Image: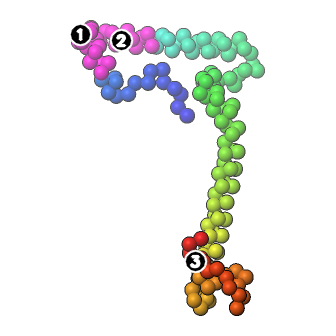
Amino acid sequence: MAPPLLLDINGPEFVLLLVIAVILFGPERLPDLARKAARLLRYLRTVAGSAQQQLSKELGPEFEDLDFRDLHPRTFVQKHLLDEVEPVIADVKSEVSDFGKTIKNSSADISGTANSIKDRSPGGPQDVVAGATPGRAVTPFDLEAT
């Protein structure tokens, strides 16, 4: 999973910001402002990195493997809640797919049995009724309608 970006800016938004910057500051001052912004960003990254190093050093050796990206709320929830649920979800999905295969096989067996009964009956599926005996009146039904 990619780390979250500080500013989530896509192409068209960047072009719009660039046009607004050119209008506000002018094309002469824009390169100097870009250099200053890059220096500020580099300084902020250095400060954040040194703060992380200092915090790791002060926490001691028992927190050596602490990754500060894991403290981001989205990563924290995924790591501690969703990772425990994923095996359960996979088990349920496999059981549902197995159940679906069983239903398909049963459906194929039932349709095969219905076809064999249809082939053996003299008057079609309406004359075949479970438990029907010759000489006994039974209400006819259509196997394909049920």
Say which label, 3 or 1, has the lower sequence index. 1
* Amino acid of disc 3: Asp
Left or right: 99 with respect to 29?
right
Which residue appears at 29% of the width and 13% of the height?
A: 21
Q: Residue 22, located in which quarter of the rendered image? A: top left
Q: Which residues are magenta?
A: 16-41
Give the structural element (helix, strand or loop) at label 2. Answer: helix
Residue 18 is covered by the magenta coloring: yes
Left or right: 40 with respect to 23?
right
Residue 74 is covered by the magenta coloring: no
Image location of residue 67, percent across then percent down: 64, 24
Image location of residue 73, percent across then percent down: 61, 24
Mark 3 vs mark 2, CA separation in Å? 83 Å
Image location of residue 76, percent across then percent down: 64, 27
Which residue appears at 65% of the width and 51% of the height?
A: 93
Image location of residue 112, percent across then percent down: 61, 78
Out of 93 and 57, give the one closest to the viewer.
Answer: 93
Query: On the image, numbered disc 1 is attached to which residue?
Result: 26
Which residue appears at 56% of the width and 75% of the height?
A: 144
Query: On the image, numbered disc 2 is attached to which residue?
Result: 35
Q: Using a 10 Å C-alpha cutoff, classify the residue at mark 2 as few (fewer than 14 neighbours), some (14 to 19) or many (20 or more).
A: few
Quadrant in which the N terminus is drawn? top right
Q: Determine which of the numbered discs, if any, sits on residue 142 in the image.
A: 3
Out of 25 and 37, give the one closest to the viewer.
Answer: 25
From the viewer's perspective, is residue 96 above or below residue 15?
below
Out of 93 and 113, give the one closest to the viewer.
Answer: 113
From the viewer's perspective, is residue 52 above or below residue 83?
above
* Amino acid of disc 2: Arg
Q: Using a 10 Å C-alpha cutoff, classify the residue at mark 3 as few (fewer than 14 neighbours), some (14 to 19) or many (20 or more).
A: few
Q: Main secondary structure of the magenta part?
A: helix
